[in-house]
Amino acid sequence: MMQTNPGHLTPQMLPKAMAEGLYVHVPFCFHKCHYCDFYSITRQDEGRMEKFVERLLREAEVWERSVAGQSNGLRTVFFGGGTPSLLPLEMMRKILQGLKLRFDLSAVDEWTVEVNPATATLEYCQMLKQEGVNRLSFGAQSFSVNELATLERHHEPGQVSESLQLAKRAGFERLNIDLIYAIPGQTLESWKHSLEMGVALGTGHISCYGLTYEPNTPMAVKKRLGVVKGAEESLELEMFRHTRRRLAEVGWPAYEISNYAKKGEECRHNLMYWRGGNYIGLGPSGASHMEGWRWRNRPHLREWEEAVDEGRLAAVEVEQLSAEQRARELGMLMLRLCRGVNYEEFAGRMGMDGRALFSGVVQRLTKHGLLEGDQSGFWLSEGGLAVADAIAAELLRG
């Protein structure tokens, strides 16, 4: 793996390739949730937001002029954060219109914006729909007031349903909600209640994540100091298995370890990640990948602004993967999908024989009941799902 001087990465250094996805990171939040480790800032005003919008479009122009990252291959756009819907309506409209002027978005068939239930309005949803956004994702996390307080989420459970109704009135048909399980103090019955509340909302997609204690987040500090106690591993596993069973019963089968969807409602942007696609990340901390080159923008608003003002990429953690490293990483990503690693798709993407590359690992882990497979590929067994991260590490090592 070659490390590149981050101060000198330019689009011209990258292989000429089609970018399939575009990610836009909006860093503004009105409050920092205690479990979140995504880059965000809580102190902002309209002036600072205006500068962010101007620079974001200027950053897009760097790619517009580049031979790398050609945008006529773009199929998906995703706005994450932070809280994208915290941007004032006209500023968000300016971004949406500006990106359409700078990139060829004519073939985009999925454009997602994350929305906080506490910030959704009918007017805002209508504007997003008018400008081409066709999918919204709402961070519900829990339908328990106490659990939301533990997570430091500042919305009421009822606002999730209200927000979804506004989105539907605005014309949105593709909707997602995020839920979190293994919250400190959460019981299996409480999780079942939140899951049933989520099912009753009738969205086409549900994401269910086990709470992780990311280093240096307030939640991780509280756990280290004994202020909160993490869920027992056995309870978390029981919650995970119940989720898979229950959502499959009601028509949302898992298509990835943490994601469940009705047929045809899978998140195409995330599928692009898990299938090793090329994508461009805009905004502070936005991640990019281009044919084995990967990096992310500086996770600091002012430093990102300075780089944009100087007409350069705000790239840090720049890596160029070898062909084998990239192939093994693709195997790790594909394994997250319920269909697992499909050898034909893998060969089409990498030009390598996945049977030969992964034969030793597949034989060993199949013998232990952690993988299953046939001539078409291999996938996680029911037992393997519980230790998916460890199995992914095995694929990377070989």
Image: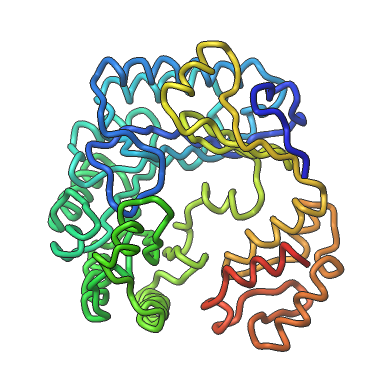
- Residue in view at x 31 percent, y 44 percent: 172
Would you place residue 381 above or below residue 1 in this image? below
In this rendering, would 5 be left or right of 312?
right
**Residue 186 pos. (x, y %):** 24, 73
Q: Is residue 174 visible?
A: no
Which quadrant of the view contains residue 129?
top left
Q: Is residue 336 visible?
A: yes
**Residue 386 pos. (x, y %):** 52, 78
**Which quarter of the figure is the N terminus placed in?**
top right
Would you place residue 4 above or below residue 275 in this image? above
**Residue 68 pos. (x, y %):** 70, 26
Q: Nearer the viewer, residue 168 or 153?
A: 153
In this rendering, would 261 be left or right of 34?
right
In this rendering, would 392 be left or right of 46?
right
Would you place residue 262 above or below residue 68 in this image? below
**Residue 61 pos. (x, y %):** 56, 16
- Residue in view at x 33 percent, y 29 percent: 130
- Residue in view at x 24 percent, y 39 percent: 170
Q: Nearer the viewer, residue 51 or 376?
A: 51
Q: Nearer the viewer, residue 349 or 80?
A: 80
Which quadrant of the view contains residue 72?
top right
- Residue in view at x 35 percent, y 75 percent: 250
Which quadrant of the view contains residue 147?
bottom left
**Which quarter of the figure is the C terminus placed in?**
bottom right
Q: Nearer the viewer, residue 262 or 78?
A: 78
